[in-house]
Amino acid sequence: MSPSPSAVQELFRSCFGDRADGVWLAPGRANLMGEHTDYNEGFVLPFALGQGIVAAAARRDDSSGRRLVLCSAQEPGSVAEVSLDGLSPGQVSGWAAYPAGVAWALAAAGYAVPGACVAFDSDVPAGAGLSSSAALECATALALTELAGVAVDRRELAAMTRRGENEFVGVPSGIMDQSASLLGQRGHALLLDCRSLETSQVPFDPAAAAAQLLLINTRARHELTAGQYGRRRAECEQAARLLGVPSLRYLTDVADTDRLTDPVLRRRARHVVTDDQRVLEVVGFLTRGSGSGSGDVLGEIGRLLTQAHVSLRDDFEVSWPEADVAVDAALTAGALGARMIGGGFGGSVLSLVRAEAAEPVRAAVAEAFGRRAWTAPEFLPADPSDGARRLGLQ
Ligand code: ADP
Ligand code: MG
């Protein structure tokens, strides 16, 4: 999986009439557990997907100032050109803002960013909650730093690409997506402590236990997203303030949230505290079960996935109708568990299924959508995969 290096080199040649110096791949991600916990300084457990964005890139030496010239197979017919001299937030709009934001953040951190031509190709659906944006940023970051001949620590790259997305593109996202894309390892999920920024690799290989993770792209995106995300962040901060802690991460007992008199704030805080606990429970099961399905590790993880969905739906109130229907249909058809992933109000559902239940689950979800005359969902495998890297040129 992930688009082939030869196809993106071909695209590079057709956009720029020349050969690329190299091809880099950065994967999208799914999050096994821990939603809306990142900005509460809690735990998340994402993994890198087999699907990703590839970037074919070459340095360019412009006499008239450094430029980033960009094309993408998913944005046919348009070549974006960005001047790197004096680049600042607000100057670039549209998809080119993501790669330009990376160049801006690298320069802000003191790295000499060369002018470059970059062609992108992707098999991560954009806007499906699988972080095509982080894949685009991380592929750009690897390409630009390697073209510049500098080796940058992956954690620093994660921080810089995130800064580009936050400050240049203007999306207030956490550090999870870029960390998963840059630090992912095949057969593992990445435990990330968003307070200390410590990470550890947790063995996770459902295929070894004759199971699989199945992504269901609900193809829905409800317009509320941006405002609701900000509102949830503000509610969590208010709850922490009222409880006298720096962030909700500092609560270790869900009973502490009972001290909140406002029922909405109490529900929001309860989701965050219980989701942090679910991350650690999943890690416990995986660590004891060596990442596979010994005992009923997968059954336990499935149960926690579904519990997390109920919490996101009822306590945090960020689910959407297509996700609820996909989760219910998947469970009825025999999935071990399922939950919405991402910020909410659109995107994808992640389900854990034993191999023999995969087809019935797909059929049941498709049928449930068809019955409601909704756009057919897209099914994608979600295999914990390696993080961003340079690919060999053919
Ligand atoms: P997600 O990260 O969940 O996929 P976002 O809204 O954060 O959704 O990012 C999607 C945006 O990233 C797209 O609207 C587009 O601007 C950019 N993008 C993603 N993939 C590509 C691609 N292959 N080519 C060009 N731009 C892309
Ligand atoms: Mg994104």
Image: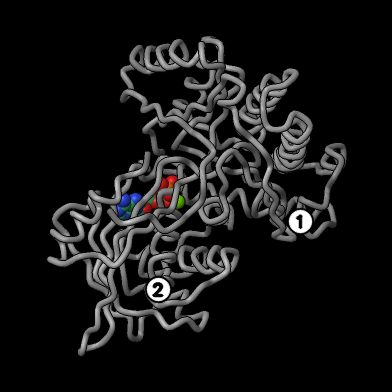
* Quarter of the picture holding the N terminus: top left
Q: Where residue 98 is drawn, which disc sits there? A: none
Disc 1 is placed on an element classified as: loop
Residue to which mark 1 is pinned: 247
**Extreme residue toward the bottom, this view:** 63
At x 65% / y 51%, what residue is drawn? 38
Residue 165 coordinates in the image, percent (x, y): 46, 63
x and y percent of residue 195 in the render? 73, 58
Whether residues under marks 1 and 2 lie with C-beta atoms below 8 angstroms apart, the answer is no
Image point 58% across, 68% down: which residue? 153
Please name whichever residue, 193 or 295, is drawn nearer the observer in this view of the structure: 295
Q: Residues within 10 Å of mark 1 (few under 14, many from 20)?
A: some
Q: Left or right of 65: which side holds 13?
A: left
Amino acid type for the residue under numbered disc 2: Ala
Res 205 quadrant in image: top right
Which type of secondary structure does the marked residue at label 2 adopt? helix
> Which quadrant of the figure has residue 14?
bottom left
- Residue 214, position as x, y percentages in the image: 49, 26
Q: Where is mark 2, residue-wise?
A: 103
Is residue 194 left or right of 284 when viewed as pictured? Answer: left
In this rendering, the answer to whether 90 lies above or below 177 is below
Lower position in the chain sequence, tag 1 or tag 2: 2
